[in-house]
């Protein structure tokens, strides 16, 4: 597995996402519940072990108590995969989420994309530098996520972070609620993907490309090929896996990324 360097931390170019594990399908309330029922603790840990066997060394997951317990149990059993933490507005204030990341053994923490979009929409982005400082004080790499390209244009002028989490799709309004709303109407417009991919080329920090599959709406081969073309040498991709019907999904997705990356390299 190819890797990138963020500060002193080596990160696999393929990062395992956990939206499916946490029951965020971005499809329907019924699918959300189906994912939660499928992902027992044992199945999650088995998925982590498979990820490690494929060379994936990083999982991106929320700063809630379920995730903290999951990592504690996995590490106690000898697992070595590292946690990149995402604050979660449903789990409490950003300050509490950062504390959870530090106390829970995360290597990095970034501000939730919905929170960043929400702060942008409400003219409150001046809160963010303080959050970044708290993350750094905890000894973690610091970053931000976002769905709205304007978040990153602002960050380039006003923040010093270690990485960006760049969503290919700006799929719902975040002016009223920073958290994802189960069952809310979402849209995945191709032009959003093009806009974010173009913006990433101008950014001064490494980018983790996410929502590249549009929550299962995009053809995987096309999606990984597009992401590989858009990724710079220091970038990575984050993909969640829901493999109830496709047991080899993780291995297949890793293969698609590696094939697309090799093709880009010539």
Image (cartoon, helix red, strand yellow):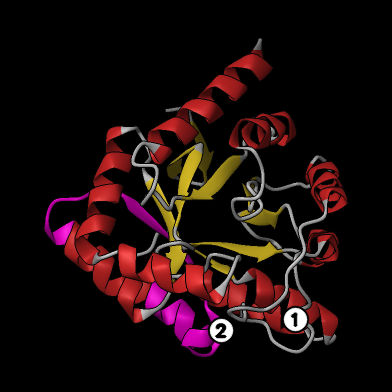
Vertical order, 51 against 89 (above or below): above
The stretch of residues the image draws in magenta is: 75-101
Rendered residue at 79%/66% (across/down): 151
Which residue is outermost to the top? Answer: 266
> What label does residue 118 carry, if any?
1
- Do the CB atoms of the residues marked 2 and 1 lie less than 8 Å apart? yes
Q: Earlier in the sequence, mark 2 or mark 1?
A: 2
Mark 2, residue position:
89
Q: Position of residue 146 (x, y in %)?
A: 71, 64
162 relative position to 136: left or right: right
- Label 1 packing within 10 angstroms: few (<14), some (14-19), many (20+): many
Secondary structure type for disc 2: helix
215 relative position to 258: left or right: right
Q: Position of residue 245 (x, y in %)?
A: 39, 47
The Cα atoms of the two marked residues, 2 and 1, are separated by 11 Å
> What label does residue 95 carry, if any?
none
């Amino acid at each position: 597995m190819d890797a990138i360097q963020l500060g002193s931390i080596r990160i696999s170019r393929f990062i395992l996402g956990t939206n499916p594990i946490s029951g965020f399908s971005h499809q329907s309330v019924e699918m959300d519940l189906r994912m939660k029922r499928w992902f027992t603790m044992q199945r999650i840990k088995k998925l982590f072990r498979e990820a490690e066997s494929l060379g994936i060394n990083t999982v991106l997951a929320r700063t809630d108590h379920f995730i903290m317990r999951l990592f504690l149990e996995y590490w106690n059993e000898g697992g070595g995969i590292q946690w990149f933490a995402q604050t979660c507005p449903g789990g409490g204030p950003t300050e509490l989420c950062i504390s959870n990341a530090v106390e829970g053994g995360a290597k990095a923490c970034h501000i939730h994309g919905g929170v960043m979009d929400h702060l942008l929409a409400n003219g409150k982005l001046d809160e963010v530098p303080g959050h970044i400082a708290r993350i750094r004080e905890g000894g973690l790499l610091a970053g931000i996520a976002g769905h709205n390209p304007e978040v990153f244009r602002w960050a380039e002028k006003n923040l010093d972070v270690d990485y960006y989490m760049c969503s290919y799709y700006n799929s719902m309004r975040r002016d009223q609620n920073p958290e994802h709303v189960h069952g809310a109407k979402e849209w995945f417009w191709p032009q959003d993907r093009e806009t974010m991919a173009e913006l990433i080329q101008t950014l001064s920090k490494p980018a983790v490309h996410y929502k590249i599959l549009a929550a299962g709406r995009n053809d995987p081969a096309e999606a990984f090929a597009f992401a590989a073309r858009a990724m710079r040498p220091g970038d990575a991709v984050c993909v969640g896996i829901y493999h109830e019907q496709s047991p080899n999904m993780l291995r297949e997705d890793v293969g698609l990324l590696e094939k697309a990356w090799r093709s880009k390299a010539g």
